[in-house]
Structures are given as C-alpha cells and as structure tokens.
Image (tube, helix red, strand yellow):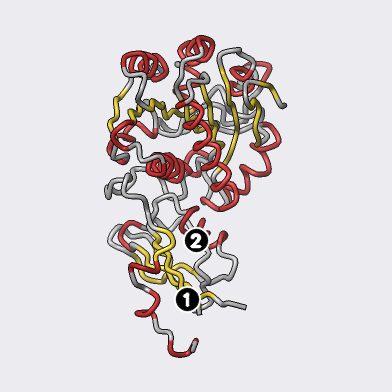
Amino acid sequence: MAETLTKQDIIKDENIVYKKTKLMTDKVLSYCPGCGHGTTHRLVMEVIDELDAQANTIGIAPVGCSVLAYEFMDIDMQEAAHGRAPALATAIKRLMPDKFVFTYQGDGDLAAIGTGETIHAANRGENITIIFVNNGIYGMTGGQMAPTTLPGMKSSTCPYGRDVKMMGYPLKITELIARLPGTYFVTRQAVHTPANVRKTKKAIRKAFDLQKQNKGLTFVEVVSNCNSGWKMTPVKANQWMVDNMFPFYPLGDIKVDGELVK
Amino acid sequence: MAKVKGDIVVDIERCKGCEVCIDACPTHTIAMSEDVNGKGYHYMQNVHDACTGCTNCAIVCPDGVITVYRVKI
C-alpha cells in the first residue's frame, strides 16, 4: 500500500493539515530571514481567523521593524505615531467597544518612547490586547542599544557591551506592568521552537478571549531574536536567545486572572 | 497501528533560507537546496520521504511558506 502512494496522492486539497492563514496577505514580509516577527504576525492572524473576527478587529501598527504590519495583516489597521499605539488603541476601543482592538509593538516602541502610554493604558485597565515583541535591540535603525538590552550585550551604540554603571539596567516592562491593577493577563512567550509557537498561540487566544469579556488589559510579550542586529545566523541567534535572553526574561505567565503568579 | 505519511509544498520564491525549519524537523526530512531562488536565497526542500506531516516546520516558519499535507495509510 505504502509503495503505491505517490506525491500526487498526498498533495491534494483535502489532505492539507497546515496552510498559511488567509488573513496574512501574500506580500513578502519585510523582515530579515528567521525573524520572530513573521511568526508572531501569523499567530495573531490565526487567532483572529479562529475567532472569525476579521471584520471586527482593529490592529494598531507601531513604529519599528513592524511598521509595515498593516501591509501583511488583512484586517483594519491604523498606524500610530512612535510609541503612541496604546493611546490610539484606547481611543478606538472606547469609540467601538464591541471590536477587538490590539496593538503590535516592539521594545523600542513600547519600552522606550512609549513607556508612558503603555503604563497609563495598563493602569487605566483599558480592554485592549498588547502584543509586545522584545528582541533587546533597536532592529530597524541598525541595532542600537534599547532599554531592554541585556547587561554586557553588545550593540552598535555599546560596542564593548552594556555597562550598567553608565547606561543603566535593562527594563523588565512586562513585570512592571503586571503589578498594575488594571492588567488582567500578562505573559511572556517565545516563537523559536514549534512547542513555544503553540504556547504563544494559546496565550494570544486567551488574551483575545479575555478582551471579549472586558476583563482589563491583556499583555503578551514575545521574546524574539534579532539575527541582523545581533550579527548571527538565525539558528545561532535562537540559541543565543535561549542561553542569554531567557535567564533574564524567563518565559511563562506572570499574571493570570488578575493575580500575580510569579 | 495506523501510519501516516506527509509531504510539504514550499513557496520557493518567498523562502528566505533562515534554516529554522531544519532544526524543528523531527525526522530530518528537509534540507537547504543547492540552487537559489529569485532573491538569491537557498530555499528549503524535502530531501527524502520520511515526512510525517507533523507541521513543525510550517508553524515555526516566519514567512509561512510551507503547506503541509498528511494522509493515513
């Protein structure tokens, strides 16, 4: 039986078990090879597809590598000024409370210039979802030091490694906002292995479900690689991320159902 | 025991050759091609028929270039 099975017998529409979701456009992603942004984009779109909410979702694109997110996500999107995505999301959610509203931000956008907007949106308990991609560097502008850069980590503006005495300590913004009473679900995930991708998708699904119940702000951090900024191959960058990023940014839920678990 | 057999179809022109899928494949079915696509990247391809259609490669692919098929035999 097995010998008679040819490629043509397997490759048929009824045998498809996985296909890129239709909510991702066919445009080629502008990200570097192996970047976690592409996977995170697709997971968000898969969740919206599962919720059948293509017409009821408004996304906010940030400034940074993912500035063109509206080109790749086939839903209604609005571009925000640098760091102002949570403020814009607040306005949209208050005007249209029955829509799903999410922001998609990087660490330079959310944890540096947008810290004020992020913390106040979380503190007000806005019913929005924030997807936060943390790669510890300003990727788009050429790998400069970000607030999330690890101590000792090299970047183009700290070529000898981040010296915490002079440049300060990395900001764990996810832990910070988890302590605010307005947040309901805060988690940190990654997308470098299939198991982590599945966990991240579950977390994003949970965040959107909770948004529907008006529970408060839901926050999903995705620790990602930046192989161009870190000057590594994608596979080595993922390994470096496991060895160096995860001890400082441990994966797992930080706040579940409004209670701190970590 | 029911056996499964899978196969993948790769959108060659969209593949950026990051090799993340090769690490994720449990049966070592995929490898990089010697040829390059229109953008100059080596693309991933099926090199032998051990694929079980587990979808691991497709879900870690940042560019979503892989479609996975699976049949029970």
Task: Report x, y in % for residue A77.
Answer: 29, 29
| Chain to which mark 1 belongs | B
Which residue has dot 2 on it? B55
| Chain to which mark 2 belongs | B
Marked residue nearer the N-terminal end (2 or 1): 1
Q: Quadrant of residue A13?
A: bottom left
In this view, the mark in front (2 or 1): 2
In terms of depth relative to the viewer, which is nearer, B62 or B73?
Answer: B73
Please state which amino acid type lies under the numbered disc 1.
Answer: Val
The residue located at (43%, 64%) in the rendering is B68
Determine whether the residue tagged by mark 2 lies in a helix, strand or loop. loop
The residue located at (53%, 64%) in the rendering is B54
Task: Report x, y in % for residue B23.
Answer: 57, 60
Count the numbered circles shown: 2
Tell me if residue B22 comes above or below residue A251 in the rendering: below
How far is disc 2 from disc 1 in space, using C-alphas? 16 Å
Please state which amino acid type lies under the numbered disc 2.
Answer: Thr
Tell me if residue A172 comes above or below residue A195 in the rendering: above
Tell me if residue A214 comes above or below residue A138 in the rendering: above
Q: Quadrant of residue B41?
A: bottom left
The residue located at (46%, 55%) in the rendering is B18
In terms of depth relative to the viewer, which is nearer, B51 or A32?
Answer: B51
Task: Report x, y in % for residue A218.
Answer: 52, 25
Report the quarter where the C terminus of chain A lies: top right
Label disc, if present, on residue A109 of the rendered structure: none
Task: Report x, y in % for residue A26.
Answer: 27, 50
Which residue has dot 1 on it? B47
